[in-house]
Image (cartoon, rainbow, N blue to C red):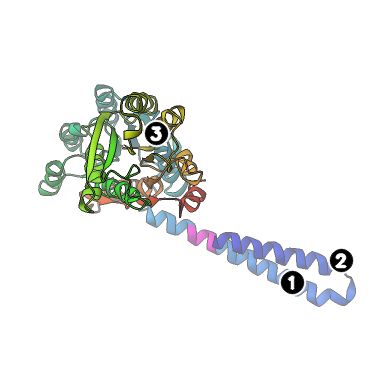
Amino acid sequence: MRLFKKATAVAMASVMALSLAACGGGAKETTAAATQAATEAASEAATEAAEAATEAAEAAGGDVSSKKIGVSIYKFDDNFMTLYRTELERYLTEELGFAKENVVIQDGKGDQAEQTNQIQNFITQKYDVLILNLVQASSAPEITDMCKEAGIPVVYINREPDAAEEERWASESIQATYVGCDARQSGTFQGEEILETANKGDINGDGKVSYIMIQGDPENVDAQYRTEFSVKALTDAGVEVEELLMQRGDWDQAKAQQIAQDALNQYGDKIEVIFCNNDAMALGALQSIEAAGRKVNEDIYLVGVDALTEAVQNVIDGKQTGTVFNDHFAQAKSAADMAVKFLNGEAVDPVNMVDYTKVTGDNAQQILDQLK
C-alpha cells in the first residue's frame, strides 16, 4: 500500500511538472520545483521498494530460492484445499521468494499409499522441507519417522495428528509441527448459529431440536470435533436435542446431496436442522432441501464450515443459515512461515492454531469481499 501511495505521488508530481511546463516562461521556476519534487518522490519510492524487498527477505530468513519444498495435498478436488494450496503456492513464491520450480505440489488422490509414495520420493530427491495434508492423519507417526530419519522437517496442515503424536514431537525434539484451526471452535460456532435463530432451532415448537448430521471422514479429528461440539453448544445452552441421523459424507457434495435427500424423504418436516461438517456437503444438502420444497431459515436450518464463496453468498441470500470461515489465507501463510523457520534452524512449537470466524448474515458480505 505504501509503495502504491509513493507511485501515486510520483505520478502526480510528474503530471504537475508537465502541466506547468506547458504554461510557458512565467512558470519556469515552478516547473523546476515540480520536476525536483517528482525526482525526490521517485527516489523515495525506490528506497521504500528496496526496503520492502529487504524486509521480505529477512522475514524469509534470507534467500530461499534454491530451497526445495515438497507439498502433498490429500486430494486436489476438495474445494477448500484448492483455495488453500493456491494461496500457499502464491505466498511461497511471490512473498517468500521460493523459486516456482522448487515448489512442487502433488495430489494425494485420497489414497494414503499414493501419498506415502510421493513423500518417499520427496525424501529420495532430498527436498529441504515438506508441507503435508495427510489423507489419513493416523499415518503421521510413520511419516514423521521417515522424515526424521532423512533429516527433513515437516509441517502438517489441515488434518491434525493426535495429541500423543504432537507431544512426541516436543519430547523427542522432532522437527515437525501442525498448522490448523481448532475444530472444536468451528463446531461450537455452528451450534451458536443455530442458537442465534429466533426459535433456537426449534422450528416446530416441540421443545427439542431434531437434526441430521452429515459428517466428513469420521477418522478425521476435524470431523469428530465439529460433530461433537456443534451439538454440545446446544446442550450446554440447555436445549434438548434429537439426532435423527448421522452419516458420513466424506466431505463430498454429491454424497451429502444423496444423504440429505434420503433423510428428507424418511423424516420429512421432523428435520429442523442439518449440520454439515463442511460447506461442500452443505451445498449438496441445499440441493436436496430445495428439491423437497423446503426453505432454509423458514422451515429448516442449514450450517456448514469453510466459508466457500458460494456458501457465503448463500448466507447472504438466505439459503444457508451460517458457515464458519476456515481462514485458508492465514493458515497457508503460517504453514509457509513455519517451513521457513525450520530451514533457518529456529525453534517451532508443535502446534500453531489459527482462529475460525463465525459467518452469519451480519458479516457475510464482509467475508465475501475478503474472499474475492
**Which residue carries the number 3 mark?**
280
Visible in this render: residue 319? yes
Instruction: Identify the residue at image location x=71%, y=67%.
Output: 13
Whichever of labels 2 and 1 marks the residue nearer the N terminus, that label is 2
Q: Nearer the viewer, residue 68 or 167?
A: 167
Whichever of labels 3 and 2 marks the residue nearer the N terminus, that label is 2
What is the C-alpha distance between the residues marked 3 and 1?
57 Å
How far from the left and from the top, in percent, is residue 318? 48, 44
Numbered label attached to residue 22: 2
**Which residue carries the number 1 mark?**
34
Whichever of labels 3 and 1 marks the residue nearer the N terminus, that label is 1
Classify residue 252 by image quadrant. top left
Classify residue 347 by image quadrant. bottom left
Amino acid, disc 2: Ala
How far from the left and from the top, in percent, is residue 180? 29, 46
Q: Is residue 49 above or below residue 179?
A: below
Amino acid, disc 3: Ala
Amino acid, disc 1: Ala
What is the C-alpha distance between the residues marked 3 and 2?
61 Å
Q: Which residues are magenta?
A: 48-52
